[in-house]
Image (spheres, rainbow, N blue to C red):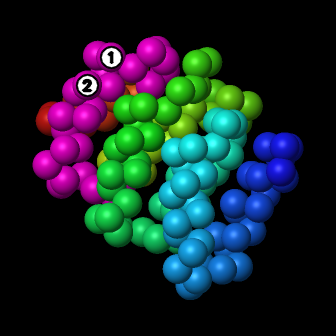
Amino acid sequence: DDSYYVRRAAVQELAKNFKDDPETKSILKERAIQDDNYFVRGAAVQELAKHFKHQLELFEIYHQCAVNDPFKDSHDPFNNPNPRRIALEIIIKQFPQHPQTLPLLRDRAENDPDEQVRKFAQKKLKQLEG
């Protein structure tokens, strides 16, 4: 569908109602990386984390999103959610001991184009390395 509202709602309903269907995870992974709209990408990442918790195979999707999502604006959790920030939050919550988590946070603390994401990564680094 051309409307990101429709695609976002579809992602959320698919995850809620068909989480046991193997195709659901594949569709969510695709939307998390490939959708044209950041609201849809962010929703897909959130739904993956909510319905497929602590699944190591998803770390790569979250990592890819945290590094490569093309979001251009500044993160605002309600009006302008940055999928890179969402993915970082999920990685920290679900994979704090993963060997790539700290290097990813260090990279995002220095190199993310969104100042809000850099500040978040710096804060979390201090807590984790503390």
Which residue sits at x=68%, y=46%? 40
The answer to whether residue 68 is seen in the rendering is yes
Element assignment for label 1: helix
Residue 116, placed above or below residue 45: above
Which residue sits at x=18%, y=54%? 97
Q: Position of residue 96 (x, y in %)?
A: 24, 52
Quarter where residue 130 is shown = top left
Which residue sits at x=69%, y=60%? 11
Q: Amino acid at mark 1?
A: Asn
Q: Amino acid at mark 2?
A: Asp
Segment colored magenta: 93-117
Q: Position of residue 31 (x, y in %)?
A: 60, 52
Tell me the tag on residue 107: 2
Residue 58, placed above or below residue 70: below
The answer to whether residue 88 is seen in the rendering is no
Q: How crowded is the residue under tag 1: few (<14 C-alpha within 10 Å), some, or many (20+)?
A: few
Q: Count how many numbered circles sit on residues in the image.
A: 2
Q: Main secondary structure of the magenta part?
A: helix
Residue 16 vs residue 33: left or right? right
Q: CA distance from mark 2 to mark 1?
A: 6 Å
Element assignment for label 2: helix
Q: In this view of the protein, which residue sits in the foreground, 80 or 7? A: 7
Q: Position of residue 83 (x, y in %)?
A: 54, 38
Q: In this view of the protein, which residue sits in the foreground, 60 or 30? A: 30
89 drawn magenta: no
Please name the residue that numbered disc 1 is placed on.
111
Quarter where residue 16 is shown = bottom right
Residue 94 vs residue 72: left or right? left
Tell me the tag on residue 130: none
Q: Position of residue 7 (x, y in %)?
A: 77, 52
